[in-house]
Amino acid sequence: MPSNFLTTVDGDIILRAGPEPDSKHDFRVHKFILSLASSVFKDMFTLPQPPDQNQNEGLDIPIIDVPDSPEIFNMILRFIYPGVEPPEIANVSTLAALFSAADKYNILSIYPVLKESMKMFLPRDSFMVYITACRFGFSEEAKEAARVSNSLSMVDRDYDEAVQHISGPELYRFVRFVQEREHKGQAKIQGLLSWSHLRGQSTCEHWEDGRDFYSLLEKEVGDAFVRNPCLELKDLFEVFDKIPDPPRGGCDLPKSADWYNEGGDDDAFSCPLVPMSIRRNLREVVVELQDLNYMLLRRAFAKDIASR
């Protein structure tokens, strides 16, 4: 296991990390640096060591066993030591283990960088970030993880061990928030993009020819919302662009002044009012979904987790 600290020849103490005898690694470090970073280490170094331990090892400096995995302990040391490049955090499980070690040793100085690292795993691992944030009392990070989460974030992975670290109410309000937002968001999409609703905004006599198109649009936007509850307008336009164009009705109705002012000259559709009604409603969908997200988030998390 690579470590700058395995070869620190002027270190005045050895910390032997590992839960099992055959998995331990020695870290020769400096009491002064670790004592500055952690009150727990400072107190630990004042305790008397077992007699003859160092003589049996053939060493002239103290040896202290710590139960942490060598990998996590190595990363903690890299955060503590000045002038050392901080480690890369590959996944949320490692991030949670680092938080746990920092909490155990009371190393408050590395909390800001660990909290910032949570953003790297959003929205991909939002549920695990939520669990980690709740576990260590980070209210704002927990809310942000919930805001970008979807119902898919809770499937296809084994969370049995992870959820043991949070309370039932914390888990319940996350699940309830995500499910309620999805249900109400789908209802808003159906209302704003339904064939009957859009039909009332057009005077095109060929509207019936595009009925399947609008049903498909409603479904695709709904599916996109399930995947990403923080949809932006560009995301919906991408959905719109992937759907085959509605049939050309050959409508020759006169174009209104308002239609021209809104920049809706789209001859590819032949029926001019149809594409403009879609664009207007997609904008409305985005605004409605964003408002819904924040409204439900505020309500679900009205009582914050205990923050650090």
Image (tube, rainbow, N blue to C red):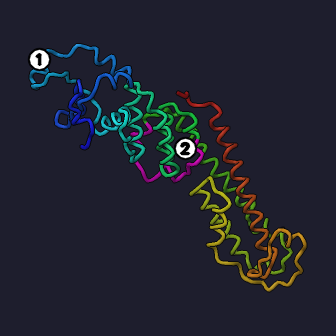
Residue 243 appears left or right of 202: left
Residue that numbered label 1 is attached to: 52
Does the magenta run of residues contain 152?
yes
Q: Are marks 2 and 1 in contact (CB under 8 Å)?
A: no
Does the magenta run of residues contain 231?
no
Residue that numbered label 2 is attached to: 145
Disc 2/disc 1 C-alpha distance (Å): 51 Å
Rendering coords of residue 96 (x, y %): 41, 38
The residue closer to the viewer here, 35 or 179, is 35
Rendering coords of residue 286 (x, y %): 70, 56
Q: Which residues are magenta?
A: 144-163
Rendering coords of residue 251 (x, y %): 82, 83
Rendering coords of residue 272 (x, y %): 81, 77
Q: Amino acid at mark 1?
A: Asp
What number is the disc on residue 210?
A: none
**Residue at (63% x, 56% y) in the render:** 231
Q: Looking at the rendering, which quadrant does residue 297 occupy?
A: top right
Per the image, label 2 sits on a secondary structure element best described as helix
Q: Is residue 44 above or below residue 261?
A: above
Q: Amino acid at mark 2?
A: Ala
**Residue at (64% x, 73% y) in the render:** 243
